[in-house]
């Protein structure tokens, strides 16, 4: 059965889309035959298509079209090569969101019907024969995120170290703890190298009671790269890539 992993954060800018894209890419290239997908459900700030190098001109349909009843969710799936476009190259299946300003404005006004989003993602994963499907959710707990979290087998919360994040994360944890989620994990992201990572992990675990999967350090190369490409594929031997690879494999038990 496909594993559905919903990735969330309290406030935008914590690195959720970058995390989703790199974890998905690492799994897609981890072993032959592993089928990986991703849904960009962050409708107010779509980014996954950029990270995966998918041009807007290539879109047939997007998640927005599905939520407006203009296509089936399977119609919005795009094949993304993780290599040289040869038939043997690993691929990832992506459902992008529409980055057009009008579409983004509709998201800010919550003008999309998201009621069936979570169940549709689970059905899509089964229909496509996926081993794992990532859902990049809106920050906070808007309706689309709540529905995605409720449909997931695993929730991965990306936490940045500031007071607002800490307070908001407590609310998210309380909500997710009431959902039928099998696994609850945290990543503490963009952590200063000057901090004691052992203390950070212990404090976060004590505060929320969730497993801290990784402490991810602030990385100049990652920040400089931005949305231009996938860090893990650009820097396969980088220590940060090793951390992300361990997270990705741990999420699916490889």
Image (cartoon, helix red, strand yellow):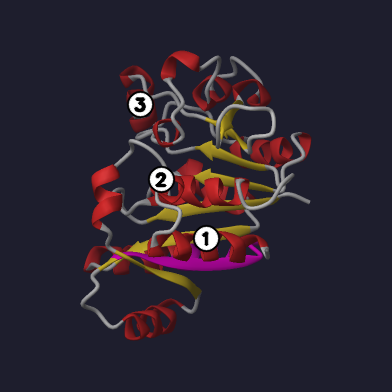
Q: Which residue is mark 3?
A: 104
Query: Which of the numbered marks, if any, corresponds to residue 41?
Result: none
229 relative to 140, above or below = above
Find the distance from the CA under tag 1 to the CA under tag 2. 14 Å
The magenta stretch spans residue 188: yes
Q: Of the two numbered discs 1 and 2 on the same chain, state the one appearing first in sequence.
A: 2
Q: Which residues are magenta?
A: 173-190
Q: Residues within 10 Å of mark 1 (few under 14, many from 20)?
A: many
Query: Viewer-proximal residue, 135 or 166?
Result: 135
Task: Answer left or right for 214 relative to 249.
Answer: left
Q: Earlier in the sequence, mark 3 or mark 2?
A: 3
Image quadrant in which the C terminus is located: bottom right
Task: Tell us which disc is closer to us: 1 or 2.
Answer: 2
Up-down relation of residue 179 to residue 228 (above or below): below
Q: Is residue 59 above or below residue 204?
A: above
**Image spot of residue 37 (x, y percent):** 62, 40
What secondary structure is found at the residue carrying circle 2?
Answer: helix
Inter-mark Cα distance, 1 to 3: 32 Å
Say the numbered circle drawn on residue 234: 2
Q: Secondary structure at mark 3?
A: helix
Q: Which mark is residue 245?
A: 1
Residues 110 and 103: in front is 103
């Amino acid at each position: 059965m496909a594993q559905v992993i919903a990735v969330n954060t309290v406030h935008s800018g914590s690195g959720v889309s970058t995390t989703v894209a790199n974890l998905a890419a690492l799994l897609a290239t981890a072993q032959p035959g592993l089928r990986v997908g991703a849904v960009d459900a962050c409708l107010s700030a779509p980014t996954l298509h950029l990270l995966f190098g998918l041009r807007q001109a290539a879109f047939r349909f997007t998640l927005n079209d599905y939520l407006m009843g203009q296509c089936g969710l399977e119609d919005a799936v795009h094949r993304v090569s993780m290599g040289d476009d040869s038939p043997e190259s690993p691929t990832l299946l992506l459902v992008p969101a529409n980055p057009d300003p009008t579409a983004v404005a509709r998201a800010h006004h919550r003008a999309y019907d998201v009621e069936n989003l979570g169940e549709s993602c689970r059905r899509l994963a089964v229909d496509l024969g996926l081993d794992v499907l990532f859902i990049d959710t809106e920050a906070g707990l808007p309706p689309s995120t709540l529905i995605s979290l409720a449909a997931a087998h695993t929730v991965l919360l990306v936490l940045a170290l500031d007071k607002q994040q800490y307070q908001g994360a407590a609310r998210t944890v309380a909500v997710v703890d009431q959902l039928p989620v099998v696994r609850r994990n945290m990543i503490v992201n963009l952590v200063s190298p000057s901090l004691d990572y052992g203390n950070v992990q212990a404090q976060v675990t004590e505060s929320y009671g969730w497993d801290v999967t990784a402490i991810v350090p602030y990385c100049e190369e990652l920040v400089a790269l931005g949305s231009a490409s996938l860090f893990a594929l650009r820097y396969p031997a980088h220590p940060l890539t090793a951390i992300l690879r361990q997270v990705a494999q741990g999420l699916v038990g490889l």
